[in-house]
Amino acid sequence: MPNELLPRLQEARLIELTRDALAMRSRPVVLATFLLLAPGLVLSGERPPVLILGALETETQPVAAALADREPSAVFGVPCVTGRLAGAAVVVAATGVGKVNAAMTTALLLERFRPAAVLFTGIAGALDPQLQPGDVVVAETLVQHDLVNQTEAGAVLRAVRSPLDGTENPIRLPPSPRLLALARQAASPGLLDPVETDTGPRVPRVLFGTIATGDSFVGSPVKKEELRERLGAYAVEMEGAAVAQVCHQHGVPFLVVRGLSDRAGNDARTEARRYLSVAAGNAARMVLAVARQLETERQ
């Protein structure tokens, strides 16, 4: 079959399935048909979806659970959930752990869904000693702490160029100013779940600052202090800056939100298991609040 005929056949199949779905008066089927078969195409009256990502299903599940009209699907083998939040089309997916998985999945889903915005939710380790498990950090900037030149003076951050147009990516990637502003509006008292500690419940905080990304789980007081001093970062994780770089290169607004599951010290893995649920839940609460405000703004 000639390659040039494939897009026409795909579009014809989309029209056929959409007509059938409308005949069944099934809006979720219409949405699923659009999302799965029509990269870059928007049905009449349908705005582009918001794409919400996390590394693991445990991080995205609280978001997916909040959607109406949920439908499972897959894109190139990547499991997704489509649905609606405050009336808006939303796609939720787990990227897998690490920068390569996050970048690959983000690029595939950007191509398939052409989203209006990308929101990333999940857990992270606290670098600032004032931060505690259950707190939430919204990235004002993201940086890859392991994308460096190793010199006699130590590690020096470096920039790389986009394969799309050869332009140099910022070393520190800022999110969409509009999404960041919506996050500030959403950070209201009572938004986050309290954290149960040995001395009783604690009210968590929402902070805005630098998040560092790298392909390593940090559970070392020495490495924690080095990253904090070198980068001025509040938190460290393994996907955010990779997602940010892909979105930056494609011109898609993005925002990264992290709930703190541990303090990146010797007990990081034990703390991460203990506080995983509340950390992932609080990050999801913030992301859902931003997504709702975004839809209100788009109406």
Image (spheres, rainbow, N blue to C red):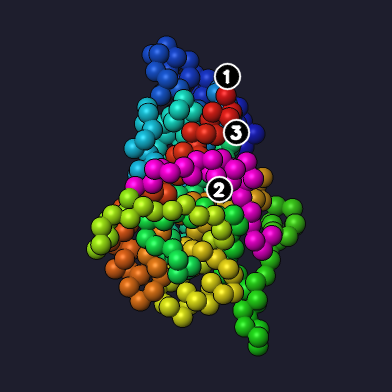
Determine the residue located farthest toward the top in the rendered image.
23
Q: Which residues are magenta?
A: 170-193
Q: Are marks 2 and 1 in contact (CB under 8 Å)?
A: no
Q: Earlier in the sequence, mark 2 or mark 1?
A: 1
Using the image, determine if residue 73 lies above or below residue 21.
below
What percent of the width, then of the height, locates residue 117? 57, 40
Specify the quadrant that holds the N terminus: top right
The C terminus lies in which quarter of the figure?
A: top right
Residue at screen point 57% across, 75% down? 229
Q: Residue at x 59, y 63 (%)?
A: 143
Q: Residues within 10 Å of mark 3 (few under 14, many from 20)?
A: some
Q: Which residue is mark 2?
A: 255
Q: Closest to the observer: 283 or 57? A: 283
Q: Is residue 180 magenta?
A: yes
Residue 50 vertical position relative to residue 21 in the rendered view, above or below: below
Secondary structure beneath dot 1 equals: loop
In the image shown, does 193 or 124 lie closer to the viewer?
193
Q: Nearer the viewer, residue 208 or 16?
A: 208
Q: Which amino acid, mark 2? A: Leu
- Which residue has dot 1 on it? 44
Which residue in the structure is indicated by mark 3? 40
